[in-house]
Image (tube, helix red, strand yellow):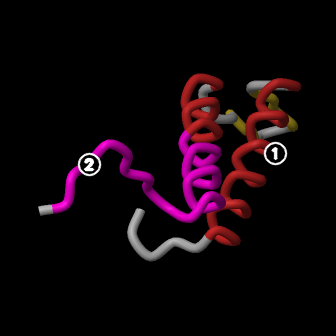
């Protein structure tokens, strides 16, 4: 993602982890006429992985290129 900072990525990772943990405890519940259905665990897990990779990449300073020969 262009223009995202390490702090923003870390915040989104934290939010994704909280959402994943909440979904682990209950997927759906109802009270009276109101109901709440949480997102799919697979989608939340993918979000956690995506933000984790981005945080790791930004933390080490961006993309690393090894074995390239400058022209």
Q: Is residue 35 above or below residue 12?
A: above
Q: Quadrant of residue 37?
A: top right
Badge 2 crowding class, 10 Å Cα cut-off, few under 14, some 14 to 19, many 20 or more, is: few
Q: Quadrant of residue 2?
A: bottom left
Q: Is residue 5 above or below residue 32?
A: below
Query: What is the tally of numbered marks visible in this picture?
Result: 2
Quarter of the rendering occupied by the N terminus: bottom left
**Residue situated in front as seen by the camera: 14 or 6:** 6
First in sequence: mark 1 vs mark 2: 1
**Residue situated in front as seen by the camera: 26 or 63:** 63
Residue tagged 2 = 68
Badge 1 crowding class, 10 Å Cα cut-off, few under 14, some 14 to 19, many 20 or more, is: some
- The secondary structure type at the circle numbered 1 is helix
Circle 1/circle 2 CB separation < 8 Å: no
Q: Is residue 56 left or right of residue 27?
A: left
Q: Is residue 60 above or below residue 25?
A: below
Residue 17 on the magenta segment: no
Q: Is residue 38 left or right of residue 2?
A: right
Residue tagged 1 = 18
- The secondary structure type at the circle numbered 2 is loop
Residue at the extreme left of the image, as rendered: 71
**Residues in magenta?**
50-70
In the rendered image, residue 20, in percent from the top left (x then y), is placed at 75, 35
In the rendered image, residue 41, in percent from the top left (x then y), is placed at 65, 25
**Residue situated in front as seen by the camera: 66 or 57:** 66
Instruction: Look at 81% across and 32% down and name the residue there.
Output: 30
Q: Is residue 52 above or below residue 71?
A: above
Q: CA distance from mark 1 to mark 2?
A: 40 Å
The residue mark sitting in front, 1 or 2, is 2
Instruction: Look at 81% across and 45% down and name the residue there.
Output: 18
Instruction: Look at 55% across and 32% down and name the residue there.
Output: 46
């Amino acid at each position: 993602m262009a223009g995202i900072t390490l702090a923003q990525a870390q915040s989104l990772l934290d939010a994704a982890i909280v959402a994943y943990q909440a979904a682990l405890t209950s997927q759906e519940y109802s009270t009276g006429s109101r109901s709440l259905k949480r997102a799919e665990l697979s989608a939340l897990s993918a979000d956690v992985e995506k933000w984790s990779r981005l945080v790791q990449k930004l933390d080490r300073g961006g993309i690393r290129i090894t074995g390239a020969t400058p022209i």
